[in-house]
Amino acid sequence: MNPKRSKLREAIAVALAVSAVGIAGTSTAFAQDQGATETLASATTLDTIRVTGTRIRSQTMTASSPVTEISQEEFKYSGATTVEDLVNQYPQLALDFDNFLNNGSTGYATVDLRAMGPSRTLALVNGRRIPKGLGETPDISIVPAALLQRVDVLTGGASAVYGSDAIAGVVNFILDNRFEGVSVNLGYSGYQHDNDNGYIQGLMDQRGFDYPTGDSGLDGTTRNIDLAIGGAFGEGGHAMAWATWRKGRALLQGQRDYSSCALNGAGTACGGSPTADPANFYIVAPGSGLYTYVAPSTSGWVIPDGPNVYNYAPINYFQRPDTRFTAGASVTYDVNEYFQPYLETMFVNRRSGTQIAPSGAFFTDLVVNCGTAVIGTMCSDIGITDDEFVVYVAKRNVEGGPRLSNDESTNYSIVAGATGALFDSGWTWDASLQYARTTAMSENHNDFVTTRVRDALLGCPTGSFDGCIPYEVWSDSVTPEQAQALQGVGIVNYATDMKVFNAYATGDLGFGIVADRPISAVAGFEKRNERFKRVADTNMQTGNFTGLGGPTTNLSGGYDVEEVFLEANVPLVADAAGFDSVDLQLGYRYTDYSTSGTVDTWKVGLGAGFADNRYRFRAGFNRAIRGANIGELFADQQIALWAGDDPCAGPTPEFTAAQCARTGVSAAQYGNVAANPAGQNNQFTGGNPNLQPEIANTWTVGFAASPIDNLELSIDYYDIELENVIGTIGARTIINLCANGQDAMCALIRRNAVTGDLFRGSDPDTSGLVVNTNGNFGTRRFRGIDLTGGYGFQVGPGRLTTSFVGSYILERSFQPVPGDSSADYSCEGLINSQCSTPEWRHIANVRYAFDRYTVGLRWRYIGEMDYRNVDGSTPANDRFLSGPGKQKAFNYIDLSGSVRLGDNITWTVGVNNIADKEPPMIGGNLSPANANALGGYDQAGRYAFTSLTFDF
């Protein structure tokens, strides 16, 4: 049963820190005064407690799985108004911050443990699954940061306990469902930066680009209001409810000098896109031997030195706008010891969107002849003698404004259940039904409708679409009315449904190996039903927009899962042989998928404590799975984009003529295949209904110690080997394998028959592309070491608490193609086109509390990375990395403090990234979507925050 008194909750938190997890994240193991130690000493009788990673409720079990805890206090002192703002800073998780993703964003926040992908991290709230977003991964936007009691981060597979998706581990958001009183929190935050990057300002001066200078002022601001109320009712009831509102303003790339132009691949000049204003015209006239850009001038058509390039950066969102409203409630009632019904509800409405550079005619191909009116004297001016030839038109729609995607989603989860004693057996039971649903709509504005563009470019000949207006790119006299006639709105609606019935009983068996320590067990059944539906309008379905990269097809499907699970904790030793306790933990789950059949998962763990439990050893093996999601199974196959370079493009290709010939480049085309300056090429992707579940084998070994009072240290090793990986080989990997002799891979590459490129056009039948559909491919292995520590002691009139969480990556290796080691690579400590993996990251905290005041300092560290290809070769030239040969380590220092203004009001204020460090800059080859910078670092400069909390 849930504990009901605040002192009991505190005692449980400390007990968990000492006996179950070894170290409580960052600060909750030690309160701001001596009360924590006193509570631990006096708490002699506790209700059984729930620990993330098992359903067994026990006071005495020595846990075998490593868990890092993030306390509610850390959210307060980091200025985090969303859970992802803080959780994703922790070194066990990928540096992924949703609001700073723009082009390519799913529009919601996720967690990604060990950077294995968010679909391989099981995200829970109070031990229950979180509703999934449109990308079929848990949308943690539904979790209210202000109502968190703590966050448990469990390393290693946990499918035997929780089922599918717990490959890398579990992130369990624990809400304070026993909250009592009234709490109101008002917050305000924003960014400030001194725009003084002389290097990139000089590059923009060379191009005549505008950019900001000096103090940015406070921008990208966020306001939030959080309300919670709770208390007891009747003789056995408790209810609590919350509501939060948060509104974040957009921040444009043009509001920072270092992101105000799109750097070229080497980082030596402001690059951009050849879809520009004025338009670029590329001629393919084989009979005349012409493969070149041409441009109109006052004296006729000429061949310029190169294409006009458009700076698409300034208008892109840097931080996306975000407005969200969350609400929820929890009600429990103790009818008697045998029956305690409960109800839990959660809701979030989120509005966000993306903004990227204007659409346009992205190399729209026109088959013309010398008599075609719109081209004027092109043939005679340039020397074209072909009967017919192709003109590719690349015109940016600056007259129509940026492409906008307005996204709105509504997620909710309802859990109804009951728990209680199972007769007088000493066992308890729990049964619940959860229904979760997400609906989302995405509206795309200001994009060009493909079927209209050709008509307008050709001057609206007979048979053109209704309302056609000639698109005067040929004379550079386009009007907003001409642009408006070509634009359309695309709408896609999404819905996910999840139903979960879960029932289990837990208790002890009445006997065991050790006297007075009976074996405890869990037995249960779970049935889960998941459905996903995507409905797009006609233009989106057919890919009839020039700037969306391909069609968004309709998708509808689902699957059912039935599971039986068992757990047992077997005490082996108690107060004997030098040990205080030795526990064996066992788990098994039988899973039956309606799509792929049956699969088994299990766990074996060992936990031991000695020297009055001041020293604890833990080890475990987990076999975990991830079943394919609905999109991976049933998505239509279609053309889409992949970010990266074609190694056979450009005047000096990366690959030899012989290698490129294997990929489909003719001798005449070699050296004449155009490279896409935007760093994007076409691929053909889609689902596979025959996918089997991924399988992971995870080993963890750890040691925790409390050598003196109030000092906690722990070290844990993890080894996760993932097999039968669901995914794609990767377009660039396919090209590499083909070039190096894999004939089967060459059959997956189809180049544009005329130009030899892989990026022009969006027709899967005629455009150049790489076939890259889903399958069960290869293996991956992730190994590392986590270190945690914490110490609290009296200093003068107050208490000083310190904490440390660090993670070192030993291995992050990939085998994309089964049985072919030529494509294998590792990423630990490397930065290149495939990797961005610092070996070491940590967060350290120091906090001092005295009287009504608290002052804290936080140190965030991201380690250095070597700039080297996975095969050891020298990467492409990058001005920021080629010289030093590495990305240097980054240190961020954050300062925060609070003061109690009377008995009921607390004022908190802080500054993160005090030094106003810019994110590490890199060339365009490595940052096509991250504003010249590596993602995950502090993107916008200093972050200042303040809040007032009223507690009654």
Image (cartoon, grey):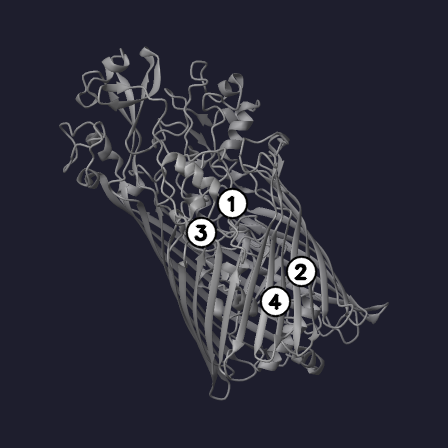
Q: Is residue 728 left or right of residue 456?
A: right
Return the disc, 3 or 4, that comes first in the chain's sequence.
4
Q: Decide if residue 687 is in sight here.
A: no
* Type of amino acid under label 2: Pro
> How many numbered marks appear?
4
Give how far across and how far down residue 578 sits, in percent.
85, 68
How far is the residue under mark 4 from the one under mark 1? 40 Å
Residue 100's label in the rendered image is: 3
Tag 4 secondary structure: loop
How far is the residue under mark 3 from the one under mark 4? 37 Å
Tag 2 secondary structure: loop
To which residue does mark 4 refer?
55
To which residue does mark 2 refer?
66
Tag 3 secondary structure: helix
Give how far across and how far down residue 600 sits, in percent.
61, 52
Classify residue 424 by image quadrant.
Answer: bottom right
